[in-house]
Image (cartoon, grey):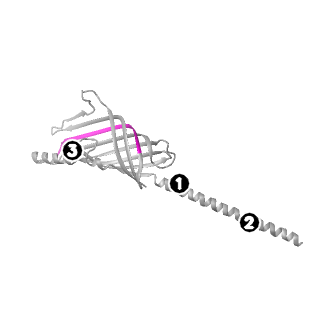
Amino acid sequence: MYSKSIYILILLLLSSYFITIAQVDDEENTEEIVFDKNALSKLRVESNIIKTNPLVLLWSQIPFTGEARFLYEKMFHKNQSSMFGASYVFPNFLLVTLLKELQNQFNVKISSGGYRVQGMYKFYINNYDFEPEGVYLGLHASYYTISFNVKNRPNDFLKYHYLNGSIVGGYQREVLDYILLDVYAGIGIKNNSRVLGDASGITSSSNLNLGSVGFSNNLKYSLGINVGYLF
C-alpha cells in the first residue's frame, strides 16, 4: 500500500520535473527566437539609407547647373536593393552671375528651375544578409530637366532635357558609425536635347548627342560618389 503510494509520488515528482525542464527549454528557445527576431528586425531596420552628394550643388550633369539631391535606398532582399531619387535643379553660382548681367543689360527678368528623378536596382555580390555593403552591379535610369523663362514673355524660353540609362558598378561601405560611402562608375546610353523658343513663337529643338566630328554619340559615361546615412 505504502510502497505503491511512494511509487506514485516518485512518478508524479519525476513527471513534474520533466515538465519543468521542458518549460525551461521552451522558454530558452523562445528567448532565442525572440533574440533572433530582434536581431533580424534590427538588421532590416538598418537596411535603409538616405543619400546625397554635396558636390553636385556646385556642378551637375547639365553644365552651369546645381542639384539638391535626395536619394533613398531600401534593401528588399538579402543582397538586392532599390534606390529612388528626386532633385531640385537650379543655376549654379556662375550661371546666376551671368543671368544677373543679362537681366541688367536687357532689362528683363529670367526665372529658372527644374528637377531630376532617378531610379536604380542594385545587386550586391557575395552579400548574403540585409546589409547594403560591398561590391555591387546595378541598372540605373535618370531624367533631368531645367528651363529658363523670360518673365511676361512666355514664348521666350530655353529648356534642356537629359534622359539616360546605364549599367553601373560600385562599392559601398560603412566608413563611420551609420555613415556610408558609395563610389560608382557606369556606361550606358543617353538622349539629350535642347528646346529654344523665341518671341515670334517659333520653337526649335537641337540634338545634344553629337560627337566632336558630328556623328551621333549616344554613349553615357558616369562616375560619382554619394554619402549616406544608414538607419
Residue located beneath label 3 in the image: 148
Residue at horizontal 51%, vertical 56%? 41
Q: Position of residue 122 (x, y in %)?
A: 44, 42
Q: Is residue 214 rendered magenta in the image?
A: no
Q: Where is residue 190 in the image (x, y as percent from the top left)?
A: 32, 35
Tell me if residue 215 comes above or below residue 118 in the rendering: above
Specify the label residue 63 is tagged with. Answer: none
Mark pair 2, 1: CA separation: 34 Å
Q: Position of residue 140 (x, y in %)?
A: 38, 40
**What is the three-letter code of the residue carrying label 1?**
Leu
Residue located beneath label 1 in the image: 40
Which of 125/149 is in front?
A: 125
Mark pair 3, 1: CA separation: 50 Å
Residue range corresponding to the magenta coloring: 153-171
**What is the three-letter code of the residue carrying label 2?**
Tyr
Mark pair 2, 3: CA separation: 83 Å
Mark 2 vs 1, N-terminal side? 2
- Secondary element at image label 2: helix
- Secondary element at image label 3: strand
Residue located beneath label 2 in the image: 17
* CB contact under 8 Å: marks 3 and 1: no
Q: Select label 3 or label 1 by which is in front.
A: 1
Chief secondary structure of the magenta portion? strand
Q: In the displayed structure, does residue 109 sit left or right of residue 1?
A: left
Q: In which quarter of the image is the N terminus?
A: bottom right
Q: In which quarter of the image is the C terminus?
A: bottom left
Residue at horizontal 20%, vertical 42%? 157
